[in-house]
Image (tube, grey):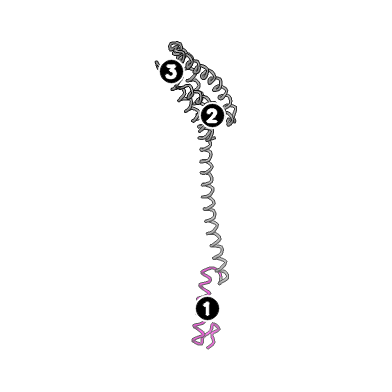
Amino acid sequence: MLFKERLICGWLLNTSVGVKRTAVITRASDPDLAKAYADEAKASSARGTELLNKVGELLDTPEERALMDQITAVRKTYTESRNQVSALKAEGKNDEARALFDKVYTPAAEAYVGKSNELLAMQQRAIDGRVATVLSSARHSSNVLVALCVATLVFSIIAGLVFARSLFRRLGGEPAAAAMVAKQANLEKWCRGHHFSFAGTT
């Protein structure tokens, strides 16, 4: 998706340079300017066609394909009028070239660039949607991770309490009972040391 968006950006840049070049050729008084830029214009057109075909191969929705059909139709008028303007300038027919430039080429170029920008905007919206989905998923994963950490902590505390109570019971019951047992054991030890017993004998 991102690669497709980059291709469209390159294609638009190529087209924009071509439109400006044609405008310069048309407005210039030098008829040889069209001949000087002929090879460059031809290479630019070939590059545009190459990028257009690559983008077309990557389109995968009905909306994208429908828009590409419109772009292809407008580009045909754009390319033909551009070539005619250049040919008229090369022949020294400046007035005819300017008239064709204003009436046919300029509207076609604006429509071509406009439709191409629509396709670019469509790709950017798709990318934004994908990014929003990824961020939403990341936030959900983060919330799940926090919940798991809290659950683990609670479980650890409960397990520790259960283990402690079990240990105290083995030692003599609950903590209070264990303390009483220890106290009684110490008392019996003291009594034996003084020749007393709990039976009352000496």
Q: Mark 2 or mark 1: which is in front?
A: 2
Give the percent coordinates (x, y) of residue 141: 53, 46
Q: CA distance from mark 2 to mark 1?
A: 94 Å
Give the percent coordinates (x, y) of residue 117: 49, 26
Compared to 113, does 142 lie above or below?
below
Compared to 15, does 187 lie above or below?
below
What's the magenta bit mostly, secondary-structure-wise? Answer: helix
Residue placed under numbered mark 3 in the picture: 32
Residue placed under numbered mark 1 in the picture: 185
Compared to 110, does 8 lie above or below?
below
Q: CA distance from mark 3 to mark 1?
A: 119 Å
Residue type for callout 1: Ala
Give the percent coordinates (x, y) of residue 185: 52, 78
Q: Secondary structure at mark 1?
A: helix
Residue placed under numbered mark 2 in the picture: 51
Q: Residue furthest bottom?
A: 202
Residue type for callout 2: Leu
Which quadrant holds residue 69? top right
Q: Is 148 or 116 nearer to us in this picture?
A: 116
Residue type for callout 3: Asp
Question: Do tag 3 and tag 2 residues touch (Cβ < 8 Å)?
Answer: no
Q: Is 72 or 1 nearer to us in this picture?
A: 72
Taking the magenta stretch, the answer to whether it contains residue 189 is yes
The boundaries of the magenta stretch are 173-202
Q: Quadrant of the N terminus?
A: top right
Compared to 8, does 73 lie above or below?
above
Q: Mark 3 or mark 2: which is in front?
A: 3
